[in-house]
Amino acid sequence: MGFMDWVAKINKRPEPEEVAVPAAPTEDDIVAALARAEAMVAAGAVPAPVSSRVKKVTGTVRQTLPRLVNLGLGSPQAYSVMATATDYLPEAIGGYLRLPRQWADSRPIENGKTSLLLLIDQLDLLSSTMDKIFDAVVRVDADALIAHGRFLQQKFGHGSDGGALQVPPEQTPLRGTLDLP
């Protein structure tokens, strides 16, 4: 090896290694993650407040999934829905289930709260966040309906009066049948 070969070898920068980026979860992957979270709850014999809150979160995520395109699949809200199903919810449940039941439900661990109360707080936070995202997703369709109604009103004039039924007095069926003093 000559001097020039040695310099070339020293100065050669290594090729960057390709990093395999996992594919984004599909809707089916997210639904499967929700089912696994529900199975964790069923198998772990958790208290009713935990079970009902998990069902609320998973139900809201399921309602939201088909409408996520309204916000854009790369949006922070879409990411939050995906992460809730695949990470945040299973991690919260798993952390609680790894603890002995009696200990988790009776020993304060932070600010006077037991593991059970901390889990309930976390589930409530996830639930309220998923509710807000669902409202935002549905609001896109509601706004489109409002905009379409304004377009029609502008294009064709005034619409209906909201569906109120106008019956002339002479056609009222009870007219004159009840004579009160």
Image (cartoon, grey):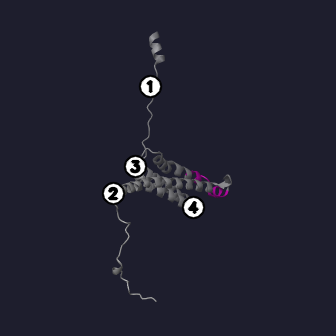
Spot the residue most to the top.
Answer: 3
Magenta segment range?
94-106
In magenta segment, residue 104: yes
Residue that carries the numbered disc 4 in the rendered image: 49
Circle 3 or circle 4, nearest the eye: 3
Residue that carries the numbered disc 2 in the rendered image: 152
Q: Position of residue 42 (x, y in %)?
A: 52, 59
The secondary structure type at the circle numbered 2 is: helix
Circle 1 or circle 3, nearest the eye: 3
Q: Residue at x 63, y 55 (%)?
A: 104
Label 1 or label 4, whichever comes before in sequence order: 1
Residue that carries the numbered disc 1 in the rendered image: 15
Residue 21 visible, this angle: yes
The secondary structure type at the circle numbered 1 is: loop
Residue that carries the numbered disc 3 in the rendered image: 69
The secondary structure type at the circle numbered 3 is: helix
In the rendered view, would you say 84 is above or below 46?
A: above
Query: Tags 3 and 4 in contact by the CB under 8 Å rule?
Result: no
Indicate the amino acid at tag 1. Answer: Glu
Spot the residue most to the left.
Answer: 156
Indicate the amino acid at tag 3. Answer: Val
Query: Tags 1 and 3 in contact by the CB under 8 Å rule?
Result: no
Label 1 or label 3, whichever comes before in sequence order: 1
Separation (CA) of disc 2 from disc 1? 61 Å
Q: Residue at x 50, y 59 (%)?
A: 56
Image position of 113 (left or right of 181): right
Label 2 or label 4, whichever comes before in sequence order: 4
Picture quadrant where residue 75 is located = top left
Image position of 168 (left or right of 1): left
The secondary structure type at the circle numbered 4 is: helix
Q: Position of residue 112 (x, y in %)?
A: 68, 54
